Image: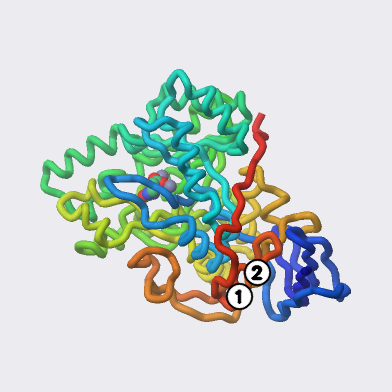
Amino acid sequence: MGLLIRNGEIVTVGSRFSADIYVQSETISAIGVNLDTPADTEIIDASGKLVFPGFIDPHVHVYLPFMATFAKDTHETASVAALIGGTTTYIEMCCPNRNDDALEGYQLWKSKADGKSACDYAFHMSVTKFVEETESQLRQIVADGTASFKIFLSYKNFFGIDDAEMYQTLELAKRLGVIVTAHCENAELVARLQQKLLAEGRTGPEWHEPSRPESVEAEGTGRFATFLENTGATGYVVHLSCERALHAALNAKSRGVKIHVESVLPHFLLDKTHAERPGVEGMKHVMSPPLRAKSNQTALWNALELGSIDTVGTDHCPFDMEQKLLGKDSFVNIPNGIPGIEDRVNLLYTHGVKRGRLDMHRFVDAASTRAAKLFGLFPRKGQIAVGSDADLVIYDPDYRGVISAKSHQVNNDYNGFEGMEIEGRPSLVTVRGKVQVRDGKFVGERGRGKMLKREPSYF
Ligand code: URP
Ligand code: ZN
Ligand code: ZN
């Protein structure tokens, strides 16, 4: 059966116009005014609605053993929440730790998603050590269609790698044509500052940010950039949180370093005072890099508008309140992370586009198209064009609502954006031509999502 999306206002990075979209099977087969309606076609009236390409979250955690516990989601729950929020593809961090075998980890992460996700997905493969078998294992993983790596410069002795391993990873990535994403904080400084603060009796969540100050992130970002410069590899800084780190990345870019920048939703909308709230309220907002002084947000919004921040992800990583309380006696034991997969698009649209901080086309770029281009998914994803996958978000700009854990779908007992208003939401969402969300509710097929295979392109 075909699908005709009639009279919507199509918005892509480069254009905005009213037209119909015809979907045959899984792809867009025609775009035009007053398209014919073949027999056996479902007609969707998109009058008064915006039609966006399916949104892409380039940074999520679904299966994640971390900080003595596991993130709350499964692919069943995360993908439904993603789709309700307009995200039709996510890229999950595959994160075996230093003691795990990388290839076994990769198979495990794949098995958790296989046949479970309702939306399409891909992986960034974390390199959490560099040993004899690493090169051959990473070659197999890239050949399997996972053409991006992840490194952590923090989380010492768990995910974190040292400079020698970073060099080896980047040098291999350059040879393989793979982009390397990086969590940039100085692991040694974080460990030392944590010890110092705890020794002084500073144990509450408000001390998380001082244990990983802006300088520590700026150093990590600058060091990653210097290693990119000297290996020729292409890099992508994940969840950049502050102006100092932004300067480090943009300075490197201005001298020709191939570096891209992602910031994640919490850093645009929340600030360190959220983590300074007493008890579990503060713990809910503990993530790394930490929420920063609000003064950083202007720089982030401006860089986003200009495109110097390439993408907005979520770093979706839900831990419930009981898990957060693992850190009640010491902030270093609070599981780091916050959910966001369901709310990213609506909050970015509301607080970016509607508030005049973000051009609508740049919004589409930052939340969809740029990630598709950087991570080898374009033009299959991130675009509304004949031949592209029919991943479409019919967006209702007249919807008004409030974010709340009482109504969200994400598998968590709190929402870090509780009480924030949204002015717009997806009313209908398709994934490869199938309606997965209607009237804001999941109506689709669970387990239909496919792993997206990607080719290396950074030679
Ligand atoms: O606090 C965070 N960001 N948790 C998830 C792990 C990571 O660093 O991405
Ligand atoms: Zn991280
Ligand atoms: Zn992450």
Image x and y of residue 64, in percent: 39, 47
Image x and y of residue 198, in percent: 15, 44
- Residue 292 appears in which quarter of the rendering? bottom left
> Callout 1: helix, strand or loop?
strand
- Residue 418 appears in which quarter of the rendering? bottom left
Determine contact: label 2, label 1, CB under 8 Å.
yes
**Residue matched to label 1:** 438
The relative height of residue 91 versus residue 158 in the rendered view (above or below) is: below
Image x and y of residue 290, in percent: 34, 51
| Residue 39 in view of the camera | yes
Amino acid type at image mark 2:
Val
> How many residues crowd around disc 2 within 10 Å: few (fewer than 14), some, or many (20 or more)?
some
Near-viewer residue (245 or 6): 6
**Image mark count:** 2
Q: Which quarter of the image is occupied by the N terminus? A: bottom right
Say whether mark 1 is within 8 Å of ligand 3: no
**Residue matched to label 2:** 435
Q: Which mark is residue 370?
A: none
Image x and y of residue 428, in percent: 63, 73
Q: Residue at x 77, y 65 (%)?
A: 23
Amino acid type at image mark 1:
Arg
Q: Residue at x 41, y 59 (%)?
A: 339
